[in-house]
Image (cartoon, rainbow, N blue to C red):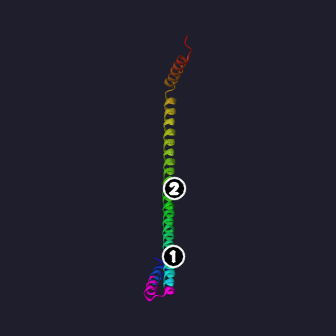
Amino acid sequence: MNKDHLEGGLRHLGGRVKTAAGAVGGKPGRQFEGAYDQAAGAAQYAYGEARDAVRDLRDGGEHLVEEGRTRFRDVSARGRDLADEAFERGQHYRDRAVHHSRSIAARADENRGTTLALVAAVAFAVGWLARPTR
């Protein structure tokens, strides 16, 4: 409730009293003043209502903006966390791949003959499978 809301209601009420007093006393000027005050009070009251409605909308908008900011911060923080986690997993998988490739290379170096026979067998199988059929 604001000043216009309250004053408009009081002016409207005062206008009704003036209108009634003018009707009882037979004074048309007083009735006219009362009707004018009633209309002006109703308009001022409606203006006060509109101000309250605008204030409520503004407050609601500010609340929505703040909630949007909060959610954006939460999402961006979660995004950073996910990016950090993905980076760490990538490093972990890279380290495992390097370790396994070095292990395989060391085994191949220890067993050169077996490795050579295995590579030759795979090459022969691929060549045999890729040959043109008649």
Say the numbered circle drawn on residue 126.
none
Closer mark to the observer between disc 2 and disc 1:
1
Which element type, helix, strand or loop, lies under badge 2? Answer: helix
User: Is 131 situated above or below 59?
Assistant: above
Quadrant in which the N terminus is drawn: bottom left
Task: Please tell me which residue is depicted at 52% across the width and 23% down the height of the picture.
Answer: 119
Vertical order, 26 against 78 (above or below)? below
x%, y% of residue 102? Answer: 51, 36
Query: Which amino acid type is shown beneath numbered disc 2?
Result: Ser
| Label 2 neighbour load within 10 Å: few <14, some 14-19, many 20+ | few
Please, is residue 87 above or below residue 52 in the view? Answer: above
**What is the quadrant of the C terminus in the image?**
top right
Labels 2 and 1: the sequence-earlier one: 1
Q: Residue furthest front?
A: 26
Name the spot of residue 70 as percent of width and height, x first: 49, 61
Please tell me how crowded label 1 is: few (under 14), some (14-19), or many (20+) other residues with Cα within 10 Å. Answer: some
Q: For the magenta stretch, what is the residue range?
A: 16-30
Q: Which mark is residue 43?
A: 1
Quarter of the image holding residue 123? top right
Determine if the magenta segment contains residue 17.
yes
> Does the magenta-highlighted stretch encompass residue 24?
yes
Q: Main secondary structure of the magenta part?
A: helix
Disc 2 target residue: 76
| SS for dot 1 | helix
Nearer to me, 71 or 120: 71
Question: For the residues marked 2 and 1, what is the alpha-carbon distance in whole angstroms?
Answer: 49 Å
- Residue, far top: 134
Compare residues 91 and 82 and report the one nearer the observer: 82
Q: Position of residue 30 (x, y in %)?
A: 49, 86
User: What residue sits 51% from the left and 54% below the top?
Assistant: 80
Identify residue type, mark 1. Answer: Ala
